Image (cartoon, grey):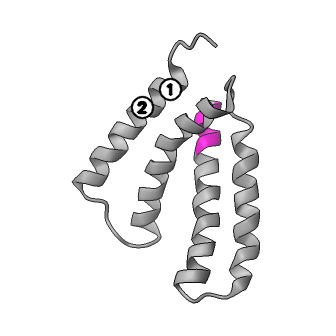
Amino acid sequence: MQSILVYIAAALAEIAGCFAFWAWLRMDKSMLWLIPGTGSLLLFAWLLTLVDAAAAGRAYAAYGGVYISSALLWLWLVEGVRPDRWDTAGVALSLVGAGIILFGPHRA
């Protein structure tokens, strides 16, 4: 359960950090947006180190499903674009895959 909470926090930090760069480069926002954006990306990287996984690659792979879900939630809540049925299907598939990676009986 703690890993899932860390993944959610990491996803929010990553999306917020990336959005700051998007806002600067694509929405003509001030370069000052990069200050909190960079801090948010540093927070994201640190949070992923807190996941209980034996290998970094497995932690990152499982994180992918949570990231996809969070990105579509961001799309809806922040950008005002409602995800469609294809988005929803993709999220479901990615979460199943993340669950298999995170909770599967790995040998090492």
Q: Which stretch is magenta?
A: 2-7
Q: Quadrant of the N terminus?
A: top right
> Disc number at residue 4?
none
Q: Position of residue 103 (x, y in %)?
A: 52, 21
Q: In the displayed structure, does residue 89 sit left or right of residue 8? A: left
Q: Position of residue 106 (x, y in %)?
A: 56, 14
Q: In the displayed structure, does residue 36 sit left or right of residue 71? A: right
Dividing the picture into quadrants, the one containing residue 97 is top left
When the figure is inspected, residue 107 is found, relative to residue 86, above or below; the finding is above
When the figure is inspected, residue 70 is found, relative to residue 49, above or below; the finding is below
Q: Quadrant of the C terminus?
A: top right
Q: Amino acid at mark 1?
A: Ile
When the figure is inspected, residue 45 is found, relative to residue 24, above or below; the finding is above
Q: Amino acid at mark 2?
A: Gly
> Disc number at residue 101?
1
Label 1: which secondary element:
helix
The verdict on residue 28 being magenta is no
When the figure is inspected, residue 68 is found, relative to residue 6, above or below; the finding is below
The 10 Å Cα crowd at callout 1, few under 14, some 14 to 19, many 20 or more, is some
Q: In the displayed structure, does residue 28 sit left or right of residue 86? A: right
